[in-house]
Structures are given as structure tokens and as C-alpha cells.
Image: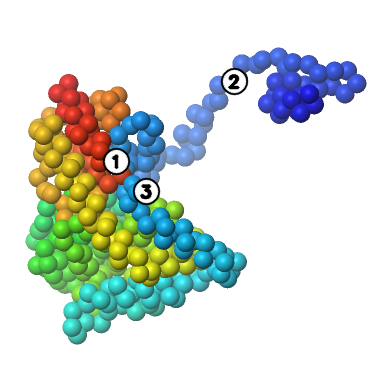
């Protein structure tokens, strides 16, 4: 009885008066909160995405989720991750502070991956040039603050990763879109943008770009790197999908860089586990020191346990086996979703079949109200991501981004049918 009364008291439903008794509280209508004063105190938002991205929505339990930015749990190396976390928790890393730049062994591993692709005669980055960070999103924020700076121009592919747009907005950087398609940007467009703006950095995803899945041809990569060098600028290379290859292998441009023009980002979050937010920035010279200072002020260091676990996973013999299986599964799921969309929603056009990554970039018929279509899909328990989020300026057309890696592929036929039905009602 006393336990029940204490529970009711904790909920505010009864009131106990010692020596008198226990009484039910009078129900009160809560006063509506007024937060209007915050509009003046906060001012205008810095970022164009004032709310969460559509990719961050939590799906209903029965929904078909094609909006996610991550692979499904069944595509992750769960056994390797669990074993690595157990081992890491038993080491000194569980009780000590990690170095600001990251564990030396993990930094050496990231550097060795670039060195493996370096051409003969090139000087690849060393472990000293590597900074371990808590996910590539935090790295983008630091790079834009430390290397570009508020009010200064940054060239950026269009379309591009929505998180880069948001990070640039938060840093106060002025974005200069450069059109980019199935084969990357035209180097002449990059040259003209540098010349017109005086920019000193270009953010790009040469390998399996998000959202298009495009991979730059080798000749484009060399030409863009030549333009960057000629302007004394930086190429911020976001290699987010390095481990998500399907029909082609990654070719990081950082491997061709001898003199610090490429600032390279690589994350393990998508391929190891979203719970292990471990990534790296590779930069040389004063740029490295500025980024390190920003990271130290922002988060001081990354958990040594997470770093040790990530290193454990990627150095296990089973890691290479996992990546081979992942490539097969991504190909299977990509082709299944693509086939379903083409069969059941023929007005949705996927011009480029991605050679890697997680997504299909789907063009809708001209004049489509994308937001209305997204709502129509959601009412049918199908979650898709509106393409406008991936443009740093006005969208060049109506698009959807469809993730083929997060959902059970057995539901892809139904997803195509629901998308087609929603589009026909527009």
C-alpha cells in the first residue's frame, strides 16, 4: 500500500499530509507555455535547415524506410564490433584520456590506406598528418571554420551532402555552387568559380557522391586537382563511401597530393557501426594545426575505447571478408530497388546507376510538388527523402533520394508500387 502511495505522490496525483491523511490533488489545466520572447533573443537561424533533415526522421514501426542515410543493421559487422568493444573495455583505453590527435595506431592505419593508393614517387601522408575525429560531420565543421572562415567563399558541388551545407552555414561560410553530374564537375566550371570568387577551398565527394552516387573519372580528378593547385587552394575531399563500393574501387585524390592541397575526410560510421562515430581528417602543414586546434576546443578528444574498438574491427581478418559480402549485398539491393522503381513508377527516372554508396538519385517529372509527394508517400507508410536538401541553392529540378541499403529488400517491390501510386495521385 505504502509503495503504491509513493508512486502516486511521485506522479503528482496525491498529496500526503502527516498526521492528517492522503488526499487526491485537484487537477489543474496546465498553462500554455509562451516562448515568443526567444525569437528576439535568438535572432535568425544560421542554417537553412532549421529542423532535422528528412534523413533523420524516426520511421513508424511498419513503414518502408527509404529515407535513411545509413545501411541496415544486417549489413554491419556485428560480431566483429561486439567482440572489439568487449576487448577495448578491458584495456587501459577504458580509463585514460586519449591523445588529442587520436591513438597513434589508428592514425597510422588511416595513413596507410592512403599510402596504399599513392602513385610511384609520391609522398603519401604520415600518421602525424592524421587527426581522429568523432564522425566526419564534426570534421567538416572544423575544416570550414579553421580553413575557410566566416564570410569567405567555399566552392561546393551541387547537388551535394546536406550535412556539408548545414556545417558551412553554421560556420558562416558563403557557398558557391558548382554544378556536378554523373561524371563530377566540369574542371572549367571549377576554374571559373575560383577565378570569379577568389575562393581558397572546394568541397567535393569524388567517390560515390551523396546523393548521386557519381564517381569522378580519373582525368576529372587530375584536372580539378591541377586547378586547385594553380589557385593556391584546398580540395576538401569527403570520402564518406570509401567502404561502400559496388562496381568500382575508390581512388582517393589525397593519394596524389604531395604538398598539402587536399584535406581528406574518411569515416568508419557507415561501414563499421553508427555507434562507433570514428573518422579521420588528413591534412598537412599549418592547415593541420588549425584544424587540430579547432577540434581540441570543440571536443578535446575522441573516446579511446571507441578508437580502440574501431581499429580492432578494421584490422581483423574478418574485415576484408565483411567488405566483400557488403559489396555483394549492396549490388543486390541497388538492382532490386532500381528494378522495382522502373517497373512500378516508370515516370521516376534514375539516370545514373551508382557504382557505390547507398542511394539512388531519382528525377521526378517536371512540375512535381516534391513535398506533397513525400507526404503522399508517408501516408502510405513509405518514407522517402526530398531532393531539395541536397542543393546548396535552388534545386535544378524535382528529385528524391532513395536509400537501397537500410530496408529489407523483400519490401522493395511494395515500395515501388507505393511510390508509383503516390505519384499518380499528384
Give the quarter of the image for residue 184: bottom left
Please report whichever mark, 3 or 1, sits nearer to the chain's N-terminal start.
3
Q: Mark 3 and mark 1: span between their CA atoms? A: 10 Å
The residue at 19%/41% (across/down) is 337
Residue 309, label in figure: none
Image spot of residue 388 (x, y percent): 23, 39
Q: Mark 2 and mark 3: span between their CA atoms? A: 43 Å
Horizontally, is 110 left or right of 6 in the view? Answer: left
SS of the residue under disc 1 = loop
Image spot of residue 199 (x, y percent): 23, 61
SS of the residue under disc 2 = loop
Label 2 Cα crowd, 10 Å radius (few <14 / some 14-19 / many 20+): few
The image shows residue 2, relative to residue 335, as above or below, that is: above
Residue 408, label in figure: 1
Q: Which residue is mark 2?
A: 31
Residue 83: tell me if it is visible.
Answer: yes
The image shows residue 367, relative to residue 89, as above or below, that is: above
Image spot of residue 238 (x, y percent): 28, 60
The residue at 22%/31% (across/down) is 414
Residue 257: tell me if it is visible.
Answer: no
The residue at 42%/68% (across/down) is 311
The residue at 13%/49% (across/down) is 353
Quarter of the picture containing the C terminus is: top left
Name the residue furthest right: 19
Horizontally, is 49 left or right of 204 in the view? Answer: right
Please report whichever mark, 2 or 1, sits nearer to the chain's N-terminal start.
2
Between circles 2 and 3, the one closer to the viewer is 3
Decide which of 229, 334 is in the foreground and name it: 334
Residue 73, label in figure: 3
Amino acid at each position: 500500500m505504502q509503495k503504491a502511495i509513493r508512486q502516486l505522490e511521485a506522479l503528482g496525483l496525491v498529496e500526503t499530509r502527516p498526521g492528517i491523511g492522503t488526499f487526491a490533488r485537484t487537477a489543474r489545466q496546465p498553462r500554455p507555455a509562451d516562448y515568443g520572447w526567444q525569437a528576439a533573443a535568438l535572432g535568425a537561424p544560421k542554417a537553412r535547415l532549421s529542423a532535422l533533415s528528412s534523413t533523420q526522421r524516426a520511421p513508424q514501426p511498419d513503414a518502408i524506410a527509404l529515407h535513411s542515410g545509413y545501411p541496415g543493421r544486417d549489413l554491419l559487422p556485428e560480431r566483429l564490433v561486439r567482440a572489439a568493444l568487449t576487448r577495448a573495455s578491458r584495456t587501459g583505453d577504458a580509463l585514460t584520456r586519449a591523445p588529442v590527435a587520436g591513438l597513434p595506431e589508428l592514425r597510422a592505419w588511416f595513413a596507410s590506406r592512403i599510402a596504399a593508393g599513392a602513385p610511384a614517387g609520391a609522398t603519401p601522408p604520415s600518421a602525424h598528418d592524421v587527426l581522429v575525429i568523432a564522425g566526419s560531420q564534426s570534421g567538416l565543421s572544423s575544416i570550414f571554420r579553421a580553413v575557410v572562415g566566416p564570410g569567405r567563399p567555399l566552392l561546393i558541388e551541387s547537388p551535394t551532402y546536406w550535412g556539408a551545407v548545414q556545417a558551412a552555414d553554421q560556420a558562416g561560410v558563403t557557398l558557391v555552387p558548382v554544378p556536378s553530374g554523373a561524371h563530377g564537375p566540369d574542371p572549367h566550371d571549377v576554374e571559373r568559380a575560383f577565378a570569379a570568387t577568389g575562393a581558397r577551398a572546394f568541397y567535393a565527394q569524388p567517390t560515390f557522391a551523396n546523393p548521386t552516387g557519381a564517381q569522378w573519372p580519373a582525368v576529372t580528378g587530375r584536372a580539378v586537382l591541377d586547378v586547385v593547385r594553380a589557385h593556391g587552394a584546398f580540395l576538401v575531399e569527403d570520402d564518406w563511401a570509401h567502404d561502400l563500393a559496388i562496381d568500382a574501387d575508390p581512388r582517393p585524390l589525397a593519394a596524389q597530393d604531395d604538398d598539402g592541397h587536399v584535406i581528406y575526410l574518411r569515416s568508419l560510421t557507415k561501414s563499421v557501426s553508427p555507434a562507433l562515430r570514428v573518422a579521420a581528417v588528413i591534412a598537412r602543414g599549418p592547415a593541420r594545426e588549425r584544424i587540430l586546434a579547432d577540434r581540441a576546443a570543440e571536443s578535446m578528444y575522441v573516446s579511446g575505447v571507441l578508437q580502440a574498438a574501431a581499429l580492432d574491427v578494421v584490422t581483423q581478418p574478418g574485415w576484408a571478408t565483411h567488405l566483400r559480402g557488403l559489396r555483394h549485398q549492396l549490388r543486390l539491393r541497388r538492382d532490386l530497388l532500381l528494378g522495382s522503381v522502373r517497373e512500378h513508377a516508370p515516370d521516376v527516372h534514375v539516370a545514373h546507376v551508382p557504382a557505390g554508396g547507398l542511394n539512388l538519385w531519382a528525377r521526378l517529372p517536371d512540375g512535381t510538388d516534391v513535398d506533397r509527394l513525400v507526404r503522399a508517400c508517408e501516408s502510405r507508410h513509405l518514407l522517402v527523402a526530398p531532393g531539395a536538401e541536397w542543393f546548396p541553392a535552388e534545386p535544378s529540378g524535382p528529385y528524391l533520394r532513395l536509400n537501397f541499403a537500410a530496408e529489407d529488400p523483400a519490401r522493395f517491390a511494395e515500395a515501388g508500387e507505393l511510390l508509383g501510386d503516390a505519384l499518380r495521385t499528384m
